[in-house]
Image (tube, helix red, strand yellow):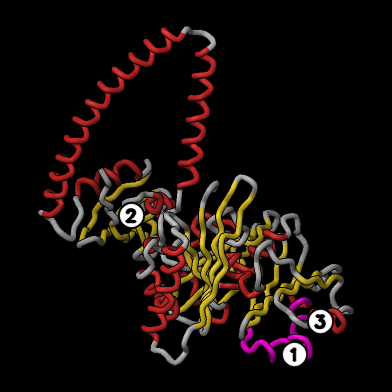
Amino acid sequence: MFFNSSIGIDINSHRIRAVHLKAAFKGMTLVSESSCLLDESKSRQDRQSDISDFINGIIREEKIAASDLFIGISGDQAILREIEFPLAVKENLRTTLSYEIEKYIPFPAGDIYFDYQIVAEDKTQEKLKLLLTAVKKETLDDFLKIAESVDQGISGMEIAPAAVANYYFHMHPDTQGPAVIVSIRDLWADVMIVQNRALIYSKTFAGSGETVDSLLAGGQLVQLRDVFFETEKTVRLVLYGVREAEDWRRRLSGEFQEIVTGNLHAGIQDAASIPAFGLALKGIRPVPVQMNLMPVGLRKKPNRTGIYVMAALAGLLLLSGGLWVGSHLMSQRQILKSLEAESARLKAEVSVVEEMSAETRMIKKNLEYLSSLRPGNTYIIEIMKELSDIIPQGAWITDFKLNGNKLGLYGMADSASELISILEKSPLFMDVVFLSAIRNDRDGKEVFRIGCNIQLKKQSI
């Protein structure tokens, strides 16, 4: 991720905070930190417009050509659940969750966006634990409308507590032990429970002044510690944005073995910008907490500028080294002749490339014309070719139905469940699900009905 640029945008009901980070050879630099108050008396549409204008203003003012951009939403708008599954479902975990999510979330599956992360695996007991995060569609749709108005697109959306956890892990790269993290900003207080570099729980409280008193006097921090770390002897309490930190130490010194005020990264002026910083980190380097609530099809493609720059620099370095070695082996005349010959060869190749480009443009026009003959549909021959390439031995498709971009597959297989992951890996198929329960025929084959959407993207030529 060398030379990548990334912006984190933390949005709550009355303020936006933004942090712009840029990768460098020796880590990264904080380019800017900014915020903007929102007028709560305005309509929802006007507030969305103000947010989009603020984000686009940062991009234009700082002349950001290509950047990853991540939006954070308040933790009180999401539901978090720690769920345990058999280890055997790991390969088809998302499909399993799609079927069973209503057991854990008090909303219909069709009314939510969700993502998850495995936080622990026990191979001895053959079980795994995951943290599920879900947001109602009507809530996230407001942020998706904002994303539509952002010039460079949005790479992802996650809850602010996850961003704070990533900031903590960034500032403490070697920490593994259990910790309770408190982050107070504006009218919100987030409490995160982390262990083994994983976020395992979070809770958001509203009203900063009353929140601090309730966390202390009400003993909620101690209760959370006892629930998650009952057998742990050393639990750290980390405070971000807590003005009365000494009072916290005095009142809670008997409950936590270590109470520290979290350090601010060089250049950060306000601890309230920590969630935005944690969001921006996702575009600079790998982070431990990886959850993205934004639908995959709406996400901006990853920025690969850094990879291209490094490849170009490596190529230039190799070329320079070759020329330096060659200058000691050949005379100036030999070098000149070699360069002239190379120039002639390249001219010939350029001529060939130009001819190929012309042919390619003509092919593109023909393809676009052929595509226009069947608007709203995809070519059956491409679907059949893709299926013949990826369907394994031991599986047969006896019938399929194509209606618009929806495809239904019917057939038999030794293991029908394996077909879901195979189809999902294909760029042509998306939203792959079983349309009915799997059953066995007389020969022991599994009879299946699978449905999916066709995603036939135009290739740039």
223 falls in the magenta region: yes
Mark 3, residue position: 248
Quarter occupied by residue 325: top right
Would residue 323 be counted in the magenta stretch?
no
Badge number at residue 408: none
Q: Earlier in the sequence, mark 1 or mark 2?
A: 1
Q: CA distance from mark 2 to mark 3?
A: 54 Å
Q: What's the magenta bit mostly, secondary-structure-wise?
A: helix
Quarter of the figure that contains the C terminus: top left
Q: Which structural element holds mark 2?
A: strand
Q: CA distance from mark 1 to mark 3?
A: 10 Å
Is 291 located above or below residue 79 in the figure? above
Q: Is residue 97 visible?
A: no
- Above or below, 97 against 221 in this view is above
Give the residue type at disc 1. Answer: Asp
> On the image, numbered disc 1 is attached to which residue?
213
Task: List the residue tagged with mark 2.
Answer: 429
Q: Residues within 10 Å of mark 3 (few under 14, many from 20)?
A: some
Query: What's the residue type where badge 2 is placed?
Result: Phe
Give SS at disc 1.
helix
Quadrant location of residue 202?
bottom right
Q: Position of residue 321 (x, y in %)?
A: 53, 22
Q: CA distance from mark 1 to mark 2?
A: 52 Å
Q: Nearer the viewer, residue 166 or 199?
A: 166
Residues rendered magenta in the picture: 205-225
